[in-house]
Amino acid sequence: MKGIIIHIALICWLLLKSGFLLAQPDTAVQLHLLPKTNDSLTLKPRQKLQADSLIKYAYSFMGDRYRRGGTSTKGFDCSGFTMTVFAKFGVKLPHTSAGQSFIGVEVSKKQISKGDLIFFRGRNSRRRGIGHVGIVISEKGKPVEFIHSSTSAGVSIDRLDSEYYRKRYMKTTRVLPLK
């Protein structure tokens, strides 16, 4: 077992040295494989991203229906919705809520602000991992509200302090320093 760990550490060191492995500051041990190119996962948006612009664009989809795997006005799943909204501003996110949870820097509940991604456990109670994502629309210090695409209501707004979401809350990340 010790030999395998040393081997993995050596591979990580070589990838880090070559520029293929980038450490994200969200946790001490979280490492992410990101492309070496100018891919938007390296968080270089086309324009200065403002939370209000991002949220205004997200609101433009209010009422659109839920569609598994959807990424358009024909229907969105939760990660397809967040992926589409951020893509408008030059930020490429993976098309899974779990994948999106590795992008950015984790923030505490007290630091949650407009434009942050908020993550929840999925509806399947047997799964413990992240299974849902939304975009925070409330001001820092106010009760947390978020816009998301849910199976029951499509693109809609909910609150973190509702019993359903409070119990499922996992974490919040800040993808970019937003104005």
Image (spheres, rainbow, N blue to C red):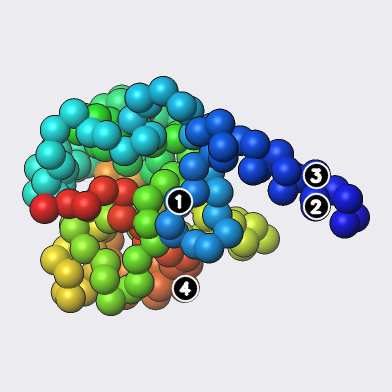
Residue for badge 4: 167
Residue for badge 3: 7
Q: Are marks 3 and 2 in contact (CB under 8 Å)?
A: yes
User: On the rendered structure, is 175 left or right of 45?
Assistant: right
Residue for badge 2: 5
- Badge 2 crowding class, 10 Å Cα cut-off, few under 14, some 14 to 19, many 20 or more, is few
Q: Quadrant of residue 2?
A: bottom right
Q: Is residue 147 visible?
A: no
Name the amino acid, label 4.
Answer: Lys
Q: Earlier in the sequence, mark 4 or mark 3?
A: 3
Q: Quadrant of the N terminus?
A: bottom right
Q: Earlier in the sequence, mark 4 or mark 2?
A: 2
**Residue at 37% from the left image edge and 50% from the top image edge:** 104
User: On the rendered structure, is 98 left or right of 87?
Assistant: right
Q: Nearer the viewer, mark 1 or mark 3?
A: 3
- Badge 1 crowding class, 10 Å Cα cut-off, few under 14, some 14 to 19, many 20 or more, is some
